[in-house]
Amino acid sequence: MFHVLLALAGGDLHGYAILKEVGLRTAGKVRLSTGTLYGIIKRLLSDGLIAELRARPAEGGDDERRKYYRLTPLGRQVAAAEAERMDEVLAIARARHLLKRARTA
Amino acid sequence: MKSEQSRATQYYRALLRLLPFDFRSDFGPEMEQVFAEQRAEVERGASKVGMWRLWWETFRGIFTTAPREHLSMLRQDSVFALRMMRKNLGFTIAAIVVLGLGIGANTAIFSVVNAVLLKPLPYEHGERLLLFRQGSPRSGLIGNNVSVPELMDYRRQNRSLDGLVEYHNMQFILLGRSEPEQVETGVVSWNFFDLFGVKPLLGRMFEPDDEKTDAPPVLLLSFEYWERSFGGDPTVVGKTFRMNDKTHTVIGVLPPFPQYPQENDVYMPSTACPFRSNPQTIANRQGRMLRIFGRMKPRLEPAQAAADLSAVAASMQKEFPKDYPEGSDLKVEATPLKTELTRDARPTMLFLLAAAGFVLLIACANVANLNLARMVRRERELGVRTAMGASRVRLFRQLLTESFLMALGGGLLGLLLAMGGLHLLTAYVARFTPRANEVHIDSAVLFFTLGAALFVSVFTGTAPALARRDSLVTTLKEGGSHATLGAARGKMRSALIVAQVAVSFLLLIGAGLTVRSLINLQRVDPGFRPENVLTMQLSLDFTKYMSNESMLHFSDSLLEKIQAMPQVTSVAMSGEFPLDRSPAFNGQFLVEGQQGNATDSKPVAEFNSVSPDYFRTLGMPLIRGRAFDGRDRSDKPLVAIVNQSLVRHLWHDQDPLARRISFDDGKSWTQIVGVIGDVRERGLDQAPTDMIYVPLAQYPQMSPGLVARTQGDPMNIARAAVQHLYEVDPNQPAGRIQSLEQFRADSIAAPRLTANLLGLFALLALAIAAAGIGGVMALSVSQRTHEIGVRMAIGARPAEIIRMILGQGMSLALAGVAIGLFGAFALTHAVKSLLFGVTPTDPLTFLGVAAVLAAAAFAACYVPARRASRIDPNIALRAE
């Protein structure tokens, strides 16, 4: 769920692009399938964290079945809050020497 | 390439079908597209493994998503449904109660059917247990029993059985407790219980040594007797009791299990019975006193076992021709024990199950109708939801969820009702089968209830949804509301009403016929007067009363003492008395001057030996000649009294008084001195049999019954009568003591309870159906307020309006009655065997039921019709 939000934080994407983006960012560790992806999209949509775009980017020649999704302000807040929470957890882990060094993102 | 791609798309679409409809319609095309791109990418990589991996991940993804989505939708729907149900609390309660009654009736009856008819016998390999009967149709030798030499032959020579055991019943007298006690005793082979696979609750079972001739007498207690008479005392094993003239040791207690052919208090090995172990009995091929049970070898059919034993019977006949009548054709029949145990219960239970099923159908139709009516009010809500994008499937699902929750509530209520009524039902079923104790609510019954609830929810939820088809668009359109919509739903509602009336008609007919049978049974003239008669069944100590003189002395002394009681007007003793459920004693006899050839079959009659006042005590009318009196003693000429039925059959109503008959092939002759009225000995529904009565003084009985006519309640003198019995012989217990009226009531208790149960079902159906008609007509009136207002404005009188509404309602009811009539003609023949004195198409019942149903429908329609006639046209016209 978080991965999909992260993917959309970089810009509006359609379903396949989200799938690819998540795969790329996690170096193939997180592999979404259509079923799981759209299960997540449905929940994010109904929770108001993402929205479907009415207007599609003017790329032309696009498959009309494609729909584009955008992070809503609420979605951005939720993603940021989650990232901060993870950051705090990581800080603790580092302080306990569970992680060797801070990785620069 | 192209085709492969389309095939992949097809597979993917098939996978998508697992998802909820809404999910699919929201995201389906998009998902397809994404999947196509995924595939295109893998194909560019041209790796087989990649493609497999993609399919595998896709598969997994859908299979984890689908259940989650379905569940969340169910949760959502349930929350909404519960809210709707709370909002319409009246409707919800009505629906749950109606469904609860329907499901409860079915659950209760099914729990019986399941325990009695469906479940295997609670014996080891119960399906291989057989009861054997031997008979020779041609020579009139028929019966359940075999003799000891015959049993030995069957046991030795059969090739189809794993075991063959014997059974017979007797009454022993248990002494040494506060009073002498008569105990029903099953006398059996040592391996009887092993054959049935019954393990002891306490102690041990019989062993081969227990059945040896001089083995110390041992005793097994039945579970019921142990509980009833010993309070479940676990230290009873090892105790000794004097029974008749021997001391018996209790070696064990049996677990509860259905006892067949009768319930016994105790069991003993066959050698314990002095008659059975008498060398004469053991050698006598014609002394048939044993019932035999066997267990077939695996994978055999009962018919094969019967053929095997019949072959043994044929060789017996060849070997011992003098023991079998000339021209006899001895055969063995095998009946599965389960059939034997459930024979009486099966037709009634299936009838009741069908009736309960009908009640449920009516309840369903009724709730479906309520649902439809409610749709009118919910039209706006549903219309709005459609407008907001809810698909029809989604709404259908929502309606089904509501129905399901309602049915679940009904199921729960039904289960409670069934549990509440189960002990009553068990007592009722016990009149039909020894398996009644096995009746309880188990997992199979719970599954059945759940299944019934599912059926109900589909039935009640689908009807309104179907009626909504093609009507959604019009809903929101101004003015388009009633005309078109009303037609679709109105038709559905009418159909449901007609169906309810038709099924109610069937149920009422079923109940009507059973009630008529019961009335006929109650009215039947039994041939005797059962009121104010005390009965006491006795079983004399066979170790003490061995001569006719001693038996006669006993009965004379007892009769004298009872007769002296001030409340007793007359008293008698007899071998049996009417309705006492003792086995009939049938025998052949010769008529002087009508002997015929040796091969001709001789006349057969039932015998009873009675003391002089028997006929007077029971109120049986003497038709001709004289009754027995003090002259007819053992040293006087043999005499007999016959009943009218025998005179009619044998002598075509000619005077029999001068005739003589013989019971011993002409060695001695018995003079007929009187003719007595017919009595229904074996049951009020059984025609009187041909009877020959002989004097008790000439034929003393080991197990006589005492009958005493009293002033006032006969049970008042019961205790005093027993005291008089102890005065005659302090060690002689009384068996069952009961009023004759009680025997009569017991003999029709089963049909009475069946009639009650069916009557209850039918009344339930009638009430539900009438409420249904009334409700539908009320709704129709309220929907047509405007139209009725117009009619009245242009001059229709209230009476005409009433007639119109009544006419509509009654036409539905009459259509239902007409359909029900056809159904009844087709179905009632199936219950013919359960009826008495009434044909399955009894015109009186059919007319009566039609009238009752029509009257109920009329009453139900009259209320809304009256309301319609009071509509004020001014208000009605302004309202629209």
Image (cartoon, rainbow, N blue to C red):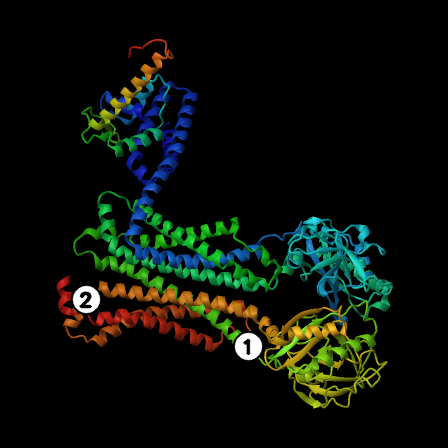
Q: Quadrant of the N terminus of chain B?
A: top left
Looking at the rendered structure, the kind of residue marked 2 is: Glu
Going 39% across and 70% down the picture, which residue do you hit?
A: B817
Chain letter of the residue beneath label 1 in the structure image: B
Q: Nearer the viewer, mark 2 or mark 1?
A: 1
Point out residue B594 in the picture as x, y percentages from the top left corner.
79, 84
Q: Which labelled disc corresponds to residue B856?
A: none
Going 49% across and 76% down the picture, which residue do you hit?
A: B842
Mark 1 Cα-neighbour bin, 10 Å: few <14, some 14–19, many ≥20? some
Position of residue B809 in the picture relative to residue B442 (left or right): left
Quarter location, residue B288: bottom right
Front position in the image: B76 or A85: A85
Point out residue B376 in the picture as x, y percentages from the top left corner.
25, 56
Quarter location, residue B372: bottom left
Q: Is residue B40 above or below residue B213?
A: above
**Furthest residue to the top?**
A101
Q: Is residue B645 visible?
A: no
Q: Is residue B720 above or below residue A97?
A: below
Going 70% across and 73% down the picture, which residue do you hit?
A: B723
Chain letter of the residue beneath label 2 in the structure image: B
Q: Which labelled disc corresponds to residue B787?
A: 2
Helix, strand or loop at disc 1?
helix
Q: CA distance from mark 2 to mark 1?
A: 55 Å
Q: Quadrant of the C terminus of chain B?
A: bottom left
Q: Which of the two labelled residues, at mark 2 and mark 1, occupies the earlier sequence position? A: 1
Looking at the rendered structure, the kind of residue marked 1 is: Gln
Asked if the residue at tag 1 contacts the one at tag 2, i.e. Cβ–Cβ closer than 8 Å, the answer is no
Q: Is residue B368 above or below residue B811?
A: above
The residue labelled by disc 1 is B522
